[in-house]
Amino acid sequence: MQRQLFHFPARIQSVIRTGVTLLMFGTPSVNADAETYRADVVIYGGTSAAVTAAVQVKRSGFSALVVCPDTHLGGLSSGGLGWTDTGKKEVIGGLAREFYQRVFSKYQQPENWNWQTKESYGNRGQGNKAIDGENRTQWIFEPHIAEQVFDEFVREFDVPVYRDQWLDRDRGVVLDGGRIQSIRMLSGDVFEGSVFLDVTYEGDLMAAAGVPYHVGRESQDHYGENWAGVQIGVNHHAHHFADLPPISPYVDPDDPSSGVLPRISSEPPGEKGSADDRVQAYCFRMCLTDHPDNRVPFEKPDGYDPAEFELLARIYQAGWRDTFRKFDPIPNRKTDTNNHGPMSTDNIGFNYDYPEASYERRKEIIAEHERYQKGWLYFHVSDRRVPESIREEMSRWGLAADEFTDNGHWPHQIYVREARRLIGKFVMTENELQKRRPTPKSVGMGSYSIDSHNTQRYVTPEGHVQNEGDIGVSTYGPYEISYDSLVPNKKDCRNLLVPVCVSSSHIAFGSIRMEPVFMILGQSAATAAVMAIEDDLAVQDISYDALKTRLLADGQVLHAANETQGARVWLPKDFAGTVLDNSDAKLVGHWQHSAANRPHFLTGYLHDGKSGDGSRSASFSTELSSGKYDVQVAYPPNNNRASNVPVKVQHAGGTTSVSLDQRKTPAIEKAFSSLGVFQFDRRQPAMVTISNEGTNGYVIVDAIRFVPVED
């Protein structure tokens, strides 16, 4: 039955219940002009997920409303991030894919090509006609085009949108029996519903409802993740100083007592793999143009101090020249400009308190990021410490005059790469993304690499400046996202779904946080909300089988073929027993990474450079249940390998030395060679150590497997 959206006048704005006890976070203030609104599903936030969720509810025959602090719909998708981080486009379905199809249709209209011809831009970012047929997609677009599509979505489906409405985070959530009854805004307006969705980047409704969440980075041990915690010495995107001569962090380069330069922390960075409360850096995804008739020159921002950019001057003096590497071209001679390099548009270290901050404090943080980024631009066009060629090139660029016209042509949405993260029924981790463990109850897929930006800029023990936190790790193909990562534990709240600040580790969120994924999860959460209303159930109790059937009927992609098999890359989850990849090994000496010979596990294998000097070893350790196990070693064979690789197996009876011939093709599933069957005791770790002492070729370290053996 079609549900109607009800609008209650101010005279009955009070929340009244008979015979029940309400829990309210504080005492509400009285506003004579306040209104009360009701819908089956109340969606808090104005992100891309808000739009797909609202449309899905309406398509299902129920009422929905969107109430949000935003004045513009679409979040980052309409806020400058037009160079979409898609990963495998084949796993983007449903309303998310329809969004990109509608963008494509916009660019088939001549009136949307104002500053260059469609032909001169070419087909960058467009889907394959052979795959999409007539429903072509466009994944690269201008901010205002994206906003047009979002606005047309809500108009077409008659979704009421209440903009510039800020949740009263202290006393605006009314709970009854573990269910949200209503939420009140600072304006006094009240929004009642049967199910609520928090689709904000910050997770404000989730937090105000008292649902558990996490901010910051977990340790490696917390969820058993290789890339968790502080990542000293790791850099995957050239966003630190590794390829430059050492740069002094001190005001006087030769005098530590002179203090550190601006935007460098004097605090210790923490131990590798340890937890902290830092979040990855934010920035604005600027829309720039080099078209003279649409260009607004970079101006000197209020409070500009060139001394803030002394570190940047030293970076250029050291020879860095990749300033324009992430000026990614979008239609009409514009860019989606993103962070790139050791001191770019990311304002590292100035956002730690943003997730929990008051609205006023968040405004201060956002203003600081805008001031920094505008100062970064002005420094490039005005300061003679910037190489002349770069000054001249930057002077060709400016803000696009036809974008963000009500905000001084500056993006209206800061890039909140992460804030709060739900601690829900299921926590997505690196282990699910890299397919070491199965994911239950898939409601959508992601596939972008695990991508976290830097979290701090610090001083090394040697007295040099360095960035930390940058991670770019493969997921080895698309991965599934669990329905249980969208919902709190039932004891925490029975009618709330969180499809943006999902239940995940910091590392897993580095991939899940992509805009197409948010749209996918927004739609799936909306379908679940409708089912909970239909059957009068808590969102945790709906039938997954029924949900899966509906999602597939709506075009969502929940599973994908294992593409890595065709590429001759093996995944640990595809083999019986306990499989440890070389990334799990404790290394001694210098090992080199390679992927030249296949098949291999995950991203590749390690080799010793054919040194045979005994200075290198790799030790695998794990806990096993007591019993007998066949211990096996995986390696891609080659005739240049060592035929006498020394391997030691530490087991319940002691330590056994075995010589392994890595020139021979592994006999077990063409992947593993057996070292023998050994007894293990759960009270002591099982350990296998590979070394290169006295070897006569390349020593390979790829993977180890323990397979239980029946007596």
Image (cartoon, rainbow, N blue to C red):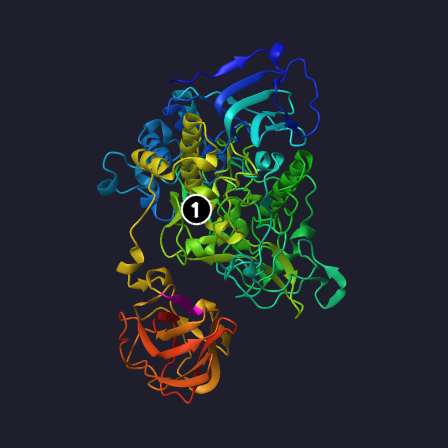
- Find residue 497 and report its horizontal and vertical position in percent: 49, 35
**Residue 432: x and y, percent?**
43, 54
Q: Secondary structure at mark 1?
A: strand
Q: Is residue 253 visible?
A: yes
Q: Quadrant of residue 251?
A: bottom right
Q: Is residue 641 above or below residue 92?
A: below
Quadrant for the N terminus in the image: top left
Q: To which residue does mark 1 refer?
A: 328
Q: Nearer the viewer, residue 610 or 285?
A: 610
Amino acid type at mark 1 = Asp
- Residue drawn at the location 67% of the way across and 51% of the way down: 308
Q: Main secondary structure of the magenta part?
A: strand
Can see residue 300? no
Inspect the magenta stretch and tell me whether residue 580 lies in it: yes
Residue at 36% x, 74% y: name it.
632
The part of the chain drawn in magenta is: 577-582
